[in-house]
Amino acid sequence: MSAVGQPIPRLEGRLKVTGGAQYTADVPLTGALHGAIVHSPIANGRTISIDTAAAERAPGVLAVFTYRNMPRIKPIQKPWVHLHPYGQSYLVLQDDQIHYAGQPVALVVADRLDQAAYAGTLITIQYEVKPPVVFNTETARGAFDPPQFLWPVNSSVGNPAKGLTDGAVRIERVYTTADRHHNQMEPHATMSTWDASGHLTIFEACQGVFALRDFVSIALEIPPEKVTVISRYVGGGFGGKAYVWPHTLLAIVAARVIRRPVRIQLTRAQMYSMVGHQPATIQTITLAADKTGKLTDIRHDSISPTSVFDDYIEYAANASRSLWGASGGISTGHKILHTNRNTPTVMRAPHEALGHVATEIAMDELAYAVGVDPVALRLLNDTLVDPYTGRPFSTRAMRRCLTEGAQRFGWNARDPVPRSMRDGRYLIGQGVAGAIYTHWRWPSKARVVLRSDGSALVESGMQEIGCGTYTVMRQVAADALGLRADKVDVHLGDTRLPASHSAIGSTTMSNAGAGVLLAANAVRDKAIALALTGHDAPFGGATANDVLTVNGGLALGHQTITYSDLLARNRLKVLIGDGNYDPVEEAKGPTAIFSFSALFAEVHVDEELGLVRLSRFLGAYDAGRIINPRTARSQAIGGIIWGVGQALLEQSETDPAMGRFLHRNYSGYLVPTNADIPELEVIFAGEFDPEASPLGTKGMGELTAVAVAPAIVNAVYHATGKRIRDLPVTVEKLL
């Protein structure tokens, strides 16, 4: 039986649920010290004086670092790139300036964590305070066009002005989304140690060991081969752990100075100001259509805040370039505003999940304006050619996602009139949204070792961030070699292994998995060569194409030989195959590659209290070939829950006077719990996509969080007749 396509349980599942999986903060290191960071309470200004004398005398304290004595770190050159991924360009403890609330102003290192934290309270700091710049509709008027760092900032195809004029129906609306934080289950943590030769080893909760290694090499001006990064398990990344944040550099430099290992683990509150966040957006969208609902023009503009020292762009309007066709044209634009906050960063799902809020709620408004069913409207505007690039889509199962999803959900039984469906005191609403997600193609290497006992080992520096990577890579190798999945071991998350890209952009299966496939094929070919021409060759005289991999070995017709016997005949302990997947960039390929989905939501709204409860949800996904339905469904469920938070609960509010996030814990920042989530239904509607990957897969992890929120918001409108354009949908907005 083929391992690929089977719902195999997670390889590391038992370790995780029994506490056997060793996360970064669990790593025991003899003589490790603990670091505690002291933060600025102000958002804008500078430090006038810092008195650390009492902290330095406190029990267990070995060092107190401020900008006055912290060694200088080489500034990282802009522009930002994936391979040198600083979370923010501003390096802390290098000068007396304060740019955001929560900025580190001191680091205390002590024998124990409680000693370091207590000593931090003894530091006396005086500040010169300036009014902070915050993000709101008034300050957003000062937003400007930033320099490009991913895609072009602005775009225009066709003749949008004519398309707008040609439209018989026009929808022009403003939609806003809130600041949000990642809130991973595992807090950010780092532990650094230097040996006598000057070799640095970093244990880090991160999404890319090689990216971190290369970044540190630049910042500290040491050769990459003198840095080892290890991160075997990550308890949730969601984008925030893909980048290097101040605490990591502080731990590295402190360990170098003190000459002992230093561990820093952030508290939940510290994660609200230290490791990025998803910025709020103010989006203006215009849709023009003929009387049937056929789009003639799409105009989508977005404004988002960033820090005073970086030009991070939340490309919210980007998805509107390719989601639906418009006969006249499509134009998009992005502006940013420098504010006193730490630099925003990617968060599941960056760019698309925010932009779809505007696009897909506006599409629902257009459906009501022209009197067309919301599913039918999307089918009418489906396109097989990417409007932005003019290239055909490699595969696009949007139509199948919409039609099969609608049938399974029972969409045809829906009464289209708002406030027409009821169950006792509850108003019932049903909503739909479509989604598109970018497919990235990046290089990745892997090694597969075939061992004398007939088992195999997969080695690659890719990351396991909770998605089931250990399991699916085992399946890929097992399939190529004709082994049972349990005969394949997997080692990941270490820069001593073959280099791989970071676990970002929903790329691991398609790219890192392709590296594993190529490595497994390489070692398989070596085994076949031995069977054809090696010592006492069992298949001598045959051709390689006639040999199959089956049942832990090779077969030629009715003749078989196990890998164990084959290696023994040739006096080999191992056979090694290397894979190097080096694809053409997606933008330079012949087709446009994206993942797609259609989402269907049902809500019950308490008419008197304004409480919204999700009662049903169905997601239909085109993510290409599915390697493991169990882990893929898990990704879908997680993405839907993520979208529920975006739609109904999550918001990081800012104090307009102090310029700092108000709620820095789970009591003030609400996330969905089990009680908020009903049974979720998942459909896989895609097909093998050879352009996307040799495995036929497309990105899925982040796709599943896209357009969940607008589907729910559209259901709320159908239930209540009240259109909410400011997320999240809260009680006070409905009452």
Image (spheres, rainbow, N blue to C red):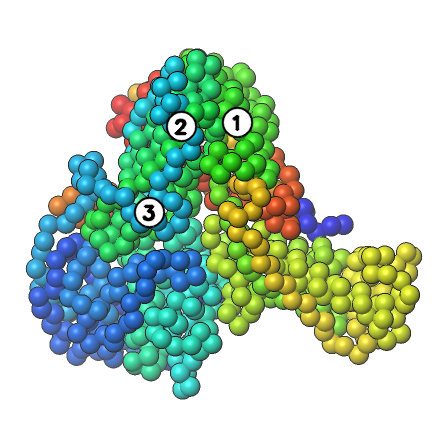
Q: Nearer the viewer, mark 3 or mark 2?
A: 2
- The residue that appears at 31% across and 74% down in the rendered structure is 253
Give the amino acid at mark 3: Ile
Q: Is residue 682 visible?
A: no
Q: Is residue 512 visible?
A: yes
Residue farthest to the bottom, as pictured:
196
- The residue that appears at 13% across and 45% down in the rendered structure is 657
Mark sitting earlier along the chain (2/1): 2
Alpha-carbon neighbours of circle 3 within 10 Å: few (<14), some, or many (≥20)? Answer: many
Q: Which residue is label 1 attached to?
A: 382
Mark sitting earlier along the chain (3/1): 3
* Residue 655 sits above or below residue 562 on the image: above
Q: Which residue is label 3 attached to?
A: 313
Alpha-carbon neighbours of circle 1 within 10 Å: few (<14), some, or many (≥20)? Answer: some
Q: Which residue is label 2 attached to?
A: 159
- The residue that appears at 43% across and 69% down in the rendered structure is 213
